[in-house]
Image (spheres, rainbow, N blue to C red):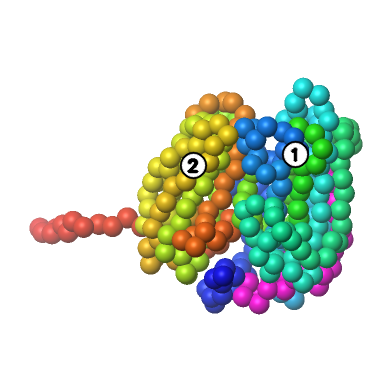
Amino acid sequence: MKNIFFGISFLLTIHSIAFSQAVPSDAENMDYLVTFSKTANNTWGDDDHVQIYFFEIPAGSKTPFYLRVFDPEVSGTNDMLNIELNSTTRFSVYGGAGTYSNKDARGVNPTGNYKSGNQLATKTFTGADSKLDNNWYTFGPFNPQDGEFDKTLNATIFKIVVEGLEGDDGNMYRFFFSTDKNSNVAVSGSNAFSYEISFRLKSKAGETGHLFPLIDNTSTSVKLNNYDFDKDGYIRLTSLNKNQHPLSLSGEGNWEVNKADITKDEKNTSFDIQFIKKSDILNDMTFNITDQNNQPLPMFSYPVGGIPKYKYKVDVVYDFQK
């Protein structure tokens, strides 16, 4: 298996910069992450009823931190309820050896030992809870030393696994990595990433959501895989060498695969996958990106290296003479 740990000094420099700790971030412009319970129809946008996210904090950090979850219960203001509320969602936090380095945790399907590492906290939310509807639940505090240190990222990694258990409803939620138990206070230098994301787009027509996959230095081509977009608008790709390239769209309950070659300039940079809404309907969907060896690439809440801007090339030379 090829190395997917971004073992290059460029990334170590980039990861020392303070990023956003909100997931989804302001840069992503998504409404919520989404996990449907296991008997929900897959045409509702979640392909496997499990969501896995990694959170990184800079090496050497000694300040205890919290993982806060917005609206973790399955009812009320934000969630997608089927005929009768009957759903349960479990959130579990992991740290220690194997949390990130185990390849099962970095897959696009929840198979094998994807719950690798030591379970540091877990909470199962069943039914309605008025105290948590449209409100925050806090896990922690956690000691930064309880994560798994990754040398090439120069960061300590923690993982949260969200599982849709009994029922057929959809849970909409957000994360925040915080130094405070009761409010959102950013952990300096942290970022979050996932290898497959199920999310809800903004419901207003014309809104643009973003995902930011990082293209490593061994990638020569990629597959961009979107699921259950419902043809609700447009998806396009922007990078240093690609200017709003249109991607083909998945219909209801289907995967659509787009392929793209990677140029030399695009290695060790982020892509900007843009989702442009054409209607005001609710739309939940799933997305992942894999390389030429079918290995998933990470998507960061705030893009490593910043939001990519297309490099325009000017081929015409003007001779300005008096």
Q: Are marks 1 and 2 in contact (CB under 8 Å)?
A: no
Q: Determine the secondary structure under disc 2.
A: strand
Within-10-Å neighbours for mark 1: few <14, some 14–19, many 20+: many
- Asked if residue 172 lies in the magenta stretch, the reply is no
Instruction: Say which quarter of the image contains residue 312.
Output: bottom left
Residue at x-position 80% and y-position 61%: 94
In this figure, which residue is indicated by the disc labeled 1?
38
- Tag 2: amino acid: Glu
- Which residue is farthest top? 83
Which of the labelled discs sits on residue 256, or is there none?
2
Residue at x-position 25% and y-position 57%: 314
Whether residue 167 is situated above or below residue 302 in the rendered picture? above
Q: Is residue 220 visible?
A: yes
Q: Quadrant of the C terminus?
A: bottom left
Q: Is residue 184 visible?
A: no
- Is 66 situated left or right of 208 in this image? right
- Asked if residue 146 lies in the magenta stretch, the reply is yes
- Tag 1: amino acid: Lys
Residue 135, x across and y down, in percent: 82, 39
Residue 238, x across and y down, in percent: 43, 50
Nearer to the camera, 180 or 69: 69
Nearer to the camera, 282 or 110: 110
Residue at x-position 43% and y-position 43%: 247
Residue 62, x across and y down, in percent: 81, 72
Q: Quadrant of the N terminus?
A: bottom right
Residue bounds of the magenta highlight: 136-157
Q: Determine the secondary structure under disc 1.
A: loop
